[in-house]
Image: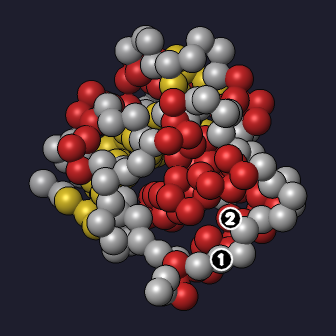
């Protein structure tokens, strides 16, 4: 029997492929953004922004008023900016730390790394900022008082209902069919997230 805290009604009028990505990818994105504690006006780099987790995270961070720097391997970032609403797109084919610092010379307030880039991105974060990874094998070493956190997606019926409602209202765009991120899955094993500081 499925526990009630894992269940929410499927969004009406939404493509089945989109619907299928919400329970794991949508919850991972939502719990990651919540773990970041991002505030309106703060800047956030999201890697893998053309994928399912990253694409949802861009949209959810924008709903919180964040300035989102989206990154992925596509040359134009059309989904990340036009569909998901990212403010700036930087291609991951270039050195990302330098690209972010061209946009925000002091660095971003936070990074959400869904592309498993890990340690190479720490330099893109301001001193005392936050870094959230969605996989344990991409968790970097903390430095400069940066708080390093790991998302471990867990059941949350209320959050899942919110995501379903947003999708049904047309306020949560689904991943592009065939995008590499549509089938991505984090290695979480329950819980809402934990931090590791060194």
* Alpha carbon separation for disc pair 1 and 2: 9 Å
Q: Residue at x 51, y 30 (%)?
A: 180
Give the quadrant of residue 123: top left
Q: Nearer the viewer, residue 75 or 187?
A: 187
**Mark 1, residue position:** 8
Placement of the C terminus among the 4 image quadrants: bottom left
* Mark 1 Cα-neighbour bin, 10 Å: few <14, some 14–19, many ≥20: some
* Mark 2 Cα-neighbour bin, 10 Å: few <14, some 14–19, many ≥20: many
Q: Residue at x 27, y 36 (%)?
A: 118
Q: Is residue 62 visible?
A: no
Q: Position of residue 132 (x, y in %)?
A: 37, 51
Any mark on residue 35, and which? none
Q: Position of residue 44 (x, y in %)?
A: 52, 43
Q: Residue furthest left?
A: 198
Any mark on residue 163, and which? 2
> Are dots 1 and 2 in contact, CB under 8 Å?
yes
Q: Is residue 78 visible?
A: yes
Q: Nearer the viewer, residue 101 or 22?
A: 22
Q: Position of residue 62 (x, y in %)?
A: 68, 49
Which secondary structure, mark 1?
loop
Question: Total marks drawn?
Answer: 2
Q: Residue at x 47, y 34 (%)?
A: 47
């Amino acid at each position: 029997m499925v526990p009630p805290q894992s269940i929410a009604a499927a969004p009406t009028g939404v493509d089945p492929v989109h619907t299928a990505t919400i329970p794991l990818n949508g919850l991972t994105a939502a719990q990651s953004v919540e773990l970041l504690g991002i505030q309106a006006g703060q800047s956030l780099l999201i890697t893998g922004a053309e994928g399912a987790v990253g694409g949802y995270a861009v949209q959810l961070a924008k709903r919180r008023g964040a300035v989102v720097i989206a990154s992925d391997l596509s040359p134009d970032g059309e989904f990340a900016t036009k569909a998901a609403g990212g403010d700036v797109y930087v291609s991951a084919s270039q050195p990302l730390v330098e690209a972010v610092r061209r946009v925000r010379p002091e660095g971003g307030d936070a990074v959400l790394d869904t592309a498993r880039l890990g340690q190479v991105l720490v330099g893109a974060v301001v001193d005392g900022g936050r870094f959230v990874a969605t996989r344990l094998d991409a968790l970097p070493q903390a430095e400069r008082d940066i708080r390093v956190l790991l998302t471990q997606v867990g059941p949350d019926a209320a959050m899942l209902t919110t995501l379903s409602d947003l999708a049904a209202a047309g306020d949560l765009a689904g991943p592009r069919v065939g995008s590499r991120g549509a089938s991505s899955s984090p290695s979480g094993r329950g819980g809402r997230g934990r931090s590791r500081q060194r």
